[in-house]
Image (spheres, grey):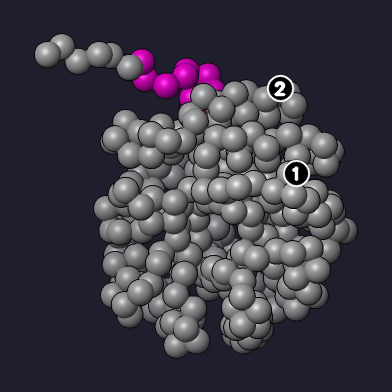
């Protein structure tokens, strides 16, 4: 677990479903707090149609801001989500060098999310991923609704693995399984990631979990045990896909980091900064957040008696 990478998706997945418009200045302040906390990657937006996802209308402006030398983070990488070729072109124009893109294993979810079938989406995403990689960008591909779908129910594991095999055959080895509907349970998480990691050497697995039904951290622990190294989470437990049947937030970044630190991993991440960020989000939205630590604080450190 010494190689656990935190990919913070709050500014994108966390905000995309919110009804209250978050001003660009507020997003910048939150992203700067995330950078200061020491998380490894921050996904600051998605290049989608602003009428469909209004909260992402300023994605280009955010990347422009953080590409300036005086604002560019020295350590934390910035990622962007793309769904189609137009979004990829916008990302290139903004100087994005870390792209995330995915295919839903649920045909119903795929059509609602992208307007494409799973098969058509896979063809386009693989071609886009190759283009981005040839341009020198880092690319992460994902299978969404990998553990179940709010519209279709159970998703056959063979269907998920078929998409993953297509990624691997294309040389795309950083692969995320996303629990878009929050249906996953720990045994399923272990089984699926074990299968993916066994497909070929050099695969790096990422895990995108939603806590819709309360299994989020249990599933994260199962993924850790299996050898997953990249974890996507959102500060304050914000988030949810606007194109799924029942929406639930992501696993909460500060709660997940607290769990890691209680297991003697990632002590370098500033938990205090993440907790204050969650409290600020609660103040901004005027409601309770899904996480725990913004209310309780971390477990007190007790000096061990020698």
Res 196 → quadrant: bottom left
Give the residue furthest to the front. 69
Q: Which mark identifies residue 70?
A: 1
- Give the quarter of the figure containing the C terminus: top left
- Determine if residue 280 is in view: yes
Closer to the camera in the image, 257 or 19: 257
User: Which residue is at 84% across, 52% downward?
Assistant: 61
The verdict on residue 176 being magenta is: no
Give the label on residue 283, or none. Answer: 2
Q: What residue is at 35 percent from the left and 52 percent from the top?
A: 3
**Where is residue 18 shown, x and y percent of the image?**
74, 42
- Give, as a single range, the part of the protein colored magenta: 291-300
Is 30 left or right of 51, judged from the image as shown?
Answer: left
| Rendered view: 39 above or below 61 | above
C-alpha gap between disc 1 and disc 2: 29 Å
Q: Residues within 10 Å of mark 1 (few under 14, many from 20)?
A: few
Nearer the observer, 189 or 171: 171
Residue furthest toward the right?
51
- Callout in the foreground (1, 2): 1
């Amino acid at each position: 677990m010494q190689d656990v990478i935190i990919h913070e998706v709050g500014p994108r997945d966390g905000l995309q479903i919110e009804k209250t418009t978050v001003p660009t200045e507020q997003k910048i302040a939150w992203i700067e707090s995330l950078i200061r906390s020491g998380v490894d990657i921050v996904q600051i937006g998605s290049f989608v149609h602003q009428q469909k996802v209004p909260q992402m209308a300023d994605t280009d402006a955010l990347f422009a801001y953080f590409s300036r030398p005086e604002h560019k983070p020295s350590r934390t990488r910035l990622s962007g989500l793309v769904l189609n070729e137009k979004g990829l072109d916008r990302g290139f124009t903004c100087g994005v060098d870390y792209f995330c893109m995915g295919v839903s294993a649920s045909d119903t979810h795929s059509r609602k999310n992208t307007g494409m079938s799973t098969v058509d989406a896979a063809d386009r995403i693989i071609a886009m991923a190759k283009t981005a990689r040839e341009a020198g960008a880092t690319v992460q591909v994902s299978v969404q609704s990998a553990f179940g779908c709010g519209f279709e129910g159970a998703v056959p594991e063979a269907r998920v693995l078929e998409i993953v095999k297509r990624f691997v055959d294309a040389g795309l080895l950083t692969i995320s399984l996303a629990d878009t509907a929050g249906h996953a349970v720990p045994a399923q998480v272990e089984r699926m990631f074990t299968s993916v990691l066994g497909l070929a050497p050099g695969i790096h697995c990422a895990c995108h979990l939603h806590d819709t039904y309360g299994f989020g951290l249990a599933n994260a622990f199962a993924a850790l045990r299996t050898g997953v190294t990249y974890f996507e989470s959102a500060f304050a437990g914000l988030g949810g896909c606007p194109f799924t049947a029942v929406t639930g937030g992501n696993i909460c970044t500060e709660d997940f980091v607290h769990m890691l630190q209680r297991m003697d991993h990632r002590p370098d991440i500033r938990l205090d900064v993440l907790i204050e960020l969650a409290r600020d989000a609660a103040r901004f939205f005027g409601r309770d957040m899904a996480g725990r630590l913004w209310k309780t604080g971390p477990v007190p450190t007790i000096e061990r008696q020698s």
